Amino acid sequence: MKYLLMIDLMKSPLRKVRFQITALVLALAMPLAMAADAPAKEPLPINVFKNLESGKKQMVVLYGTSLTVGGEWAKAVKNYFDRQFPGQVAFVNAAQSGQESNWGVTNLQKRVLARNPDLVFIEFSVNDAATKHDISLEKSEANLDTMVKAMRQQNPRVDIIVLTMNPGWDSPDQPSHKKYASDRPHLADYYDVYRKYAREHSLPLVDIYPLWAKLQQTDEAKFHKWLPEGLHPIPEASLAVTCRRLNKRSKKRAPRTRSRSKISAQWVME
């Protein structure tokens, strides 16, 4: 099953991209995997949208690295909830630049659990892969498992979405001379850890890494332009790369339409 959200009625190209990325993040976050106790026909995440549609207020928390702290995708997700469910969603970006999953476990109570979230986006792979942190693949998975179990223990119905992010490269324009690629020689393996965990635990996965990896292979000049200092996408790039997945997944038309404000949204289950 797929749960797709397609948005139209955008005036400017940049605004269109901003809204498309919002749609994409939510579309990708509702994959084939089904919750063990959920009706077979329902997509994930289930509970947060049921609650929003019934008028309940919800807490959404983003937890991860600098790719979440300053990521344009994070702003787009907030914009989505603000526009589609005005006044219903408290949104917190609890990520921290330079941090990894050891920090994530240590700070989970203060930054996530204390807010009693209903929906959590989580990504730490990109910094777990940095050799300076000395975090093995097994430890990265164990830390993710610890965080997921703690959130489930607090709220068995919390919706949790895991993400893979972009690769890096050793840019000569990096001010501090960091070598983001050389420092992460096994980054793809760390992203595989999140994919495997999501599959085995029926969690939604936003898998952006393959799109960036393909761009790196097919248009290295654009890849370098869009990651000028080696790791952090410029806003235009963050949106444009991710929107390709939306276009790929949104070929079929929706049988049901609902509108709020200036947004025409189509919710598709198949």
Image (cartoon, helix red, strand yellow):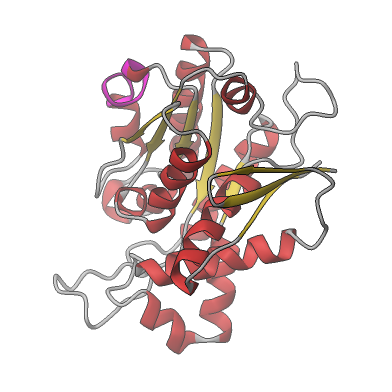
Q: Looking at the image, which is closer to me, 227 or 198?
A: 227
Q: At which x and y percent is residue 229?
A: 27, 74
Q: Looking at the picture, does residue 269 appear above or below residue 207?
A: above
Q: Is residue 132 left or right of residue 242?
A: left
Q: Looking at the image, which is closer to me, 138 or 6?
A: 6
Q: At which x and y percent is residue 6?
A: 67, 54
Q: Looking at the image, which is closer to me, 142 or 71?
A: 71
Q: Looking at the picture, does residue 231 appear above or below residue 60?
A: below
Q: Is residue 224 left or right of residue 246?
A: left
**Magenta highlight range:** 107-114
Q: At which x and y percent is residue 216?
A: 51, 78
Residue at 36% x, 55% y: name it.
71
Q: At which x and y percent is residue 107?
A: 27, 26
Question: Which quadrant of the rendered structure holds the N terminus?
Answer: top right
Question: Which quadrant of the rendered structure holds the C terminus?
Answer: top right
Q: Looking at the picture, does residue 219 appear above or below residue 155?
A: below
Q: Is residue 212 visible?
A: yes
Query: How many numbered discs?
Result: 0
Majority SS type along the magenta span: helix
Residue at 66% x, 29% y: name it.
201
Q: From this viewpoint, which residue is outermost toward the front?
A: 261
- Is 13 within the magenta? no
Residue at 46% x, 58% y: name it.
187
Q: Is residue 123 visible?
A: no
- Is 108 within the magenta? yes
Residue at 56% x, 49% y: name it.
25
Q: Is residue 256 left or right of residue 213?
A: right
